[in-house]
Image: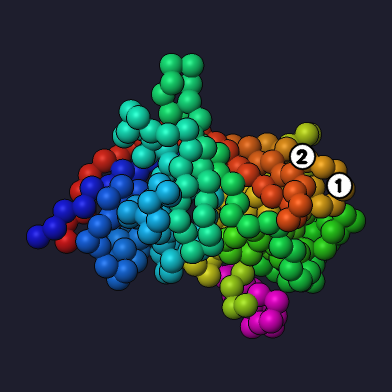
Amino acid sequence: MRAFRFVTVDVFTDRRFGGNQLAVFPDARGLTDAEMQALADEFNLSETTFVLPPAHPQNSARVRIFNRVAEMPFAGHPNVGTAFVLGREDEAAPPAYRFEEPAGLVEVVLERDAEGRVTGAEVAAPQPLRIGAPLPAAVAAACAGLAEDDILTARHAPVLAADGGNHRLLTEVSPEALARATPDLAAFRRAVAAHPAETGGFLSLYIYCRDGAGLRARMFSPLTGTVEDAATGSAATPLAGFLLHLDGGAEGAWDIVQGVEMGRPSLLRASARRMPEGIRARVAGRCVPVLRGEAVL
């Protein structure tokens, strides 16, 4: 019988039972791919991470991220939460980690309080912003359970974008529409079937609205088993990059509030900057430890 230690944390929040839940296995040596996937399904969270020795000694670790049905190339809150767990467990933790992931090397900088205790982290998207195809407003509206005129298109049509993780359909809506949106699984399936070249067989929807100087957002990904996500770093970074693309500036920063409608309020501090290779984005937030235990296999 084998035992593997795990820790759960709430990410992008400063209070327990807020933010986005994450399970972290700090030492996943000995687990097979199938066991990692089975454990992620068993935890039934949006993602679970497994930490392994790096392939190259100059890097900190190899981190594998699984949702309920598949491994992911990159995701935001799993990187922030994994760095938080590792930093909390190592008094000599470095200022930043370099994680090897399928999307590339991921840099995660630890955040500390005045006493030096790790409180959260900031993760850089591993790739520059990639803007994909637009989709009709009617498609986004149907997926969100909204009317087509709830979709705001004055600044942009619903558009697919990514920066290392799965692409997201970035869609601006009114505050009222944001509050009453309800994901429609059948509409997501129809959208993928009708737009196979654009979606690549996968679709998640990130709707947002302006809220003063900041943003409010919700993320729906029912095709992966996540009907709604409480905090999505890998959607916040392409959104920040895309807004900078629209604004035409050199850099920008946005506070994004997500998860309110789920009763798990989250705060994601997203920023983007123009670089020689394109627009690069980062997202930061705090974390709170919740549970510790062992998985016995």
Image spot of residue 278 (x, y percent)? 75, 55
Question: x and y percent of residue 82 in the render?
Answer: 41, 45
Any mark on residue 247, and which? 1
Residue at position x 46%, y 42% in the image: 97
Judged from this view, the residue extending furthest toward the right is 154
Quadrant of the frame with the N terminus: bottom left
Label 2 is placed on what type of residue? Gly
Q: Secondary structure at mark 1?
A: helix
Q: Is residue 227 above or below residue 185?
A: above
Q: Nearer the viewer, residue 64 or 147?
A: 64
Q: Quadrant of the C terminus?
A: bottom left
Q: Residue at x 59, y 73 (%)?
A: 202
Tell me what residue is drawn at x 78 percent, y 34 percent. 213
Left or right: 214 as drawn, with respect to 19: right
Please give the count of numbered marks on the rendered protein: 2
Do tag 2 and tag 1 residues touch (Cβ < 8 Å)? yes
The reply to whether residue 10 is visible in this rendering is no
Separation of residues labelled 2 and 1 (CA atoms): 9 Å
Q: Is residue 56 among the parts visible in the rendering?
A: yes
Quadrant of residue 268 in the image? top right
Whether residue 190 is in magenta: the answer is yes
| Closer-to-camera residue (91/177) | 91
Q: Which mark is residue 252?
A: 2
Q: Which mark is residue 223?
A: none
Q: Is residue 116 above or below residue 5?
A: above
Q: Amino acid at mark 1?
A: Asp
* Magenta-drawn segment: 183-199
